[in-house]
Amino acid sequence: MATDVTDGIGAVDEETWARLAADAEPDAAHGYLLFRERLEPGTALLVSADDDRGPVAAIHAVTAAAGTGLFSHPWKLLTEEQFLRLTQDDDATRIRAEHRALLGALGPDAPESGDLADWLTTTVGEPLVVRTYDRSPLFTAPDVDITRRRQAGREVVATLQDLVRQGRAAAVVLPYVAVDDELLRGLLEAAGFVRGSVTAASALHLEGYPTYQAFLDGQNAETRRNYRLAEREVTRAGLQVREVPLAEHVDRIVDLEARTGERNGAAPNRPQLRAARAYLAAVLPGAIRVAVAGRSDAEVLACTVQMYGRHGCCTLGYGSDYDVTGTSVAYHHLVFGQPVESCIRAGVPRYRLGFEAFAPKFRRGARVAKRELWLWTPDERQRESFARLLRFLDERTTGHLAAYVR
């Protein structure tokens, strides 16, 4: 079995990649990985182990960079205060001090304040990051027996470690490994990675519900009321919900998404966002849908951008025109009710809701599943320091997630 390292997913054609993307999750698609490469500022690569028929196992990764976003940069995940999960009952001063002490063990001159992620980059270097939408997968060919898939996966993981030893990155990090991914977890443990949970992903499981009404009937009274209330608010505001093609409405969709980002304190780059959305429409024309709300068929006042596969759907963005009174009420229906109904109608069994914001998702019937951050660096002492930091954050995360167990 030969191992190959190429400059991203573009080095493999879509037909060849389909052998590994047979799980039909939307974020396994060739086009989605092209989109992620365009989105991330770092250098992308694809490591694969191939037989005479093509790839048997592969991992897609991107080197983190200064402009990499929070959920794509492990050093930000490990240093941001939100992941300390502080509550009113906590001794915040003690917990912050313990966190800083654990970070300080990774290198000299840890700052008392300021951007700890930048300091960690200076101290350790930039990591090679494995992630898609809300997971860090090892893609494997389902038509190959498990023994050969395990062998191929072992070679892929070893090649990632070799790239770090060669100076291509400072560490390998898989921040969102699913706890039920026994194959990948076993390979990483055997290769000496350390782990701990920093966050979780939520999803609505829709299998077994033939209709949207059947889904609502299967929920508890509070969850059912939340969905119905969102529908009534849309009706009272005089809004109609429909689906439109992204390519035909890209300027308006980008404008609405940018407005929402600005309202939440971000500074979105509109030309960059427009280019990303136009590219998404081009590389995944059959998978991308946009649900919109307006007072007529000619009006778009709020929207969600959704990505569909046979086995799952993900919402990629939300936008709203806050200058129009009453438009904000569309949020809960466009983010929850409409995509649930659309998934059931299309026979899609799972609606993936991404990271964080656990409470509103839980109130609408979602299940919350921890993701594990697995990390390897060749410096054994540094690796053990990361292990202690991850154990600390895992304890904080586990306690926080206890409220969202069904």
Image (spheres, rainbow, N blue to C red):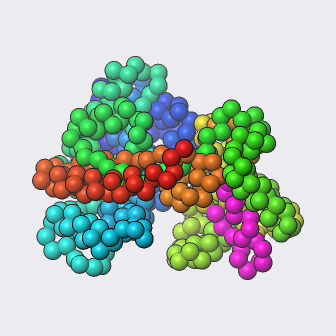
Q: Residue at x 41, y 47 (%)?
A: 371
Q: Residue at x 78, y 78 (%)?
A: 325
Answer above or below: position of 323 versus 26.
below
Question: In this picture, which residue range is highlighted in magenta?
Answer: 318-337
Q: Nearer the viewer, residue 258 or 280?
A: 258
**Closest to the observer, 216 or 122:** 216
Farthest-out residue, front:
89
In what quadrant of the picture does the C terminus appear? Answer: top right
Number of marks drawn:
0
Where residue 372 sits: x, y (%)? 37, 47
Q: Quadrant of residue 149?
A: top left
Q: Is residue 359 magenta?
A: no
Hey, which quadrant is residue 206 in on the image? top right
As drawn, is 91 to the left or to the right of 263? left
Q: Verify whether residue 328 appears in magenta.
A: yes
Please indicate whether residue 367 sits to the left or right of residue 379 in the image.
right
Quadrant where the N terminus lies?
top left
Residue 66 visible somewhere in the drawing? no
From the top left corner, tell me how far across and down residue 252 is, in percent: 71, 69
Reply above or below: 139 against 383. above
Query: Could you tell me residue 110's position as x and y percent?
Result: 19, 73
At a point 51% along the width and 35% down the height, the residue shown is: 21
Residue 40 seen in the current view: yes
Comparing 105 with 391, the one in front is: 391
- Provide residue 73's location: percent of width, then percent of height: 37, 60
Q: Residue at x 20, y 67 (%)?
A: 101
